[in-house]
Image (cartoon, rainbow, N blue to C red):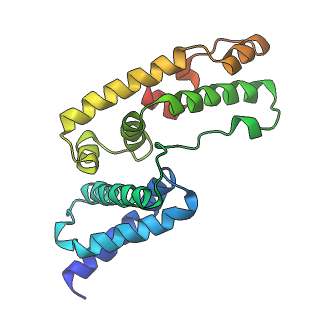
Amino acid sequence: MRPSEQRFRSAFADSYADVVRFARRRTDPDRAEDIAADTFLTAWRRIADLPHDPGDARAWLFGIARHCLLNDRRAERRRDGLVVRLLDVEAAPPLPDAEADTAILRADLATAWKHLSATDQEVLALVVFERLTASQVGAVLDVAPGTVRVRLSRARAALRRHLESPTPHREAGARSISGAVTPTAISPTTREVLP
């Protein structure tokens, strides 16, 4: 087996599931595996550019996947922004008080997320969901790590503003559930978003 083929097989084994999850968060879940297939086809064609470090290789593959997603959106004329399916508030069944509190907080996050720009959503998703470093996010977005840090700071501030603004379901939940509702109480993931 040629060294390039071995490197490709290793990158595929290490990162395929991550690339599928990356795509699933950004497009119709039925399209995620197609995007992953396009990503690895492109990676095979550009095998000489594949970084040797596994973390950098993963970020490089996310960058390719991102371009595949953009091409897919153009082809289907999709204009929707990045959507992360956090919670379908209308479809949620009635919950006991403790679970209802968590659901309200998650609903607040879902609502705030929808009000963020696609740029803010993208940088937050790469840091929180994909767990990439600033330099790796920079490789995905093709920007400098310093630019990533600025965008991340702005995105966190925007998310915090949206979480702190009043919403009808938060006000209703605050009346029916005792205890303070704070944005940082939403989940461990939210605490990563809003340090």
Give the residue drawn at x 39%, y 33%: 120
Residue 5: give x, y in percent of width and height. 26, 81
The residue closer to the viewer here, 92 or 78, is 78
Evaluate whether residue 195 shows in this view.
no
Quadrant of residue 72 within the rendered picture: bottom left
Give the residue drawn at x 28%, y 50%: 140
Compared across the picture, whether 125 is left or right of 5 comes to: right
Residue 195: give x, y in percent of width and height. 41, 23
For the image, the number of numbered tags is 0
Q: Quadrant of the N terminus?
A: bottom left
Name of the residue lying farthest toward the bottom = 1
Q: Is residue 102 above or below residue 20?
A: above
Give the residue drawn at x 22%, y 47%: 142
Quadrant of residue 4 within the rendered picture: bottom left
Residue 162: give x, y in percent of width and height. 50, 20
The residue closer to the viewer here, 63 or 73, is 73
Give the residue drawn at x 46%, y 47%: 79
Name of the residue lying farthest toward the front = 77
The residue closer to the viewer here, 191 or 35, is 35
Residue 51: give x, y in percent of width and height. 20, 62
Q: Is residue 56 above or below residue 111?
A: below
Compared across the picture, whether 150 is left or right of 87 comes to: left
Compared across the picture, whether 70 is left or right of 46 comes to: right
Evaluate whether residue 134 shows in this view.
yes
